[in-house]
Image: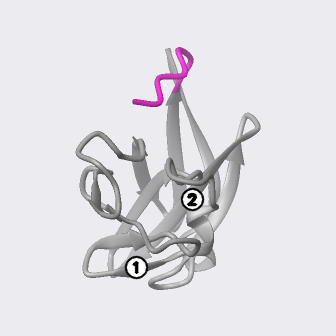
Amino acid sequence: MARPLAVCRVDEIPEGRGRVVCLDDRPIALFRDGDRIVAIDDRCPHAGASLGRGWIEGGAVVCPLHRWRFSLGDGRCLWGGGPGDRVPLLPVEVREGWVWLVESSGGDRS
């Protein structure tokens, strides 16, 4: 079963930058790229850096530690890692100016 959770207002996410929120003690990085809002796991799979402290370049999140890049479309690593390196994306909805996340109770982070 999934439950929706309002985590912040859209205008609280800086354009092209990240914002970190917690969902049941799980840090989630939110990004705004134009009209698109994307939620990903905050932890870079390479060295554990906060992706929410990164920025967007060319449709990808850039990790601030070693500059690995992750697609905002599917979470796969575009530069710096191997073919299996990726960050999980979470479903996001925008309703009346609020960002809503849905997390499955099973905790799937793949």
Task: Judge by depth and name the residue closer to the eye, 27 or 87.
Answer: 87
Q: Residues within 10 Å of mark 1 (few under 14, many from 20)?
A: many
Residue 61 found in image quarter: bottom left
Q: Please provide the residue range marked out in magenta.
A: 104-110
Picture coordinates of residue 62 (x, y %)? 43, 73
Q: Are marks 2 and 1 in contact (CB under 8 Å)?
A: no
Q: Please indicate whether residue 100 sits to the left or right of residue 94 in the image.
A: right
Which quadrant is the C terminus positioned in?
Answer: top left
Instruction: Name the residue type under label 1.
Output: Ile
Task: Judge by depth and name the residue closer to the eye, 38 or 65.
Answer: 65
Question: At 63% across and 61% down in the image, what residue appears?
Answer: 50
Q: Please indicate whether residue 22 sits to the left or right of residue 44 in the image.
A: right
Q: Which type of secondary structure does the marked residue at label 1 adopt?
A: strand
Residue 49 found in image quarter: bottom right
- Spatial CA span between label 2 and label 1: 12 Å
* Residue where numbered disc 2 is placed: 29
Q: Residues within 10 Å of mark 2 (few under 14, many from 20)?
A: many
* Residue where numbered disc 1 is placed: 56
